[in-house]
Image: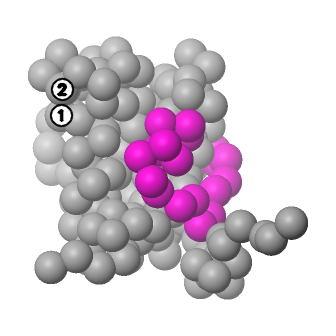
Amino acid sequence: MSYVERTLGLIKPDAIAAGHVGKILDRIIQAGFRIVALRMVYLTRAQAEAFYAVHRSRPFFEDLVQFMTSGPVIAFVLEKENAVLHYRALMGATDPAQAAPGTLRALFGQSVERNAVHGSDSPENARREIAFFFSESELVAAQALTPLSA
């Protein structure tokens, strides 16, 4: 069953530093997603630790926090039918070397650690992650995204 849902995406510091922001956003739009919120932020250490708390016991946690605070990230909310599933497919595998050709990570990722983008892995996590970066009043209503008539 398909229905319109929202998901969170991040463009990570590596992709911003490499100048890939416009290319990544263009591919997302070309894939039929609507961007309903967008902002560039510098995550504090406390924010990065809170956002990735699910990985706290993993050996890569400290490196991940350090990387995600090394430069700005661009957070955005996408809307589309089955947005979580479709955005994860567009991102590709976590390891860019294993990602399918044409996916964001295959095109713009450097390594498992520096893989250009993040996306929510479930509708439940999408709701939590969206709320981490955006208040409800910052999300554009779908009807506001309808093109204006000439």
Residue 60: quarter of image:
top left
Residue 41 part of the magenta-drawn span = yes
- Whether residues under marks 1 and 2 lie with C-beta atoms below 8 angstroms apart, the answer is yes
For the point 49% across and 75% down, the residue is 131
Residue 120: horizontal and vertical position, in percent?
31, 59
- The local secondary structure at tag 2 comes to loop
Query: Which of disc 2 and disc 1 is earlier in sequence?
Result: 1
Question: Spatial distance from mark 1 to mark 2, Cα to Cα?
Answer: 7 Å
Residue depth check, mark 1 versus mark 2: number of the one nearer the observer: 2
Residue on which the image places disc 2: 100
75 to the left or right of 126: right
Which one is in front, 32 or 132? 32
Residue 91: horizontal and vertical position, in percent?
30, 39
Residue on which the image places disc 1: 93
Q: Image height check: is 92 above or below 120?
A: above
Which one is in front, 117 or 100? 100
For the point 21% across and 51% down, the residue is 55
For the point 62% across and 64% down, the residue is 37
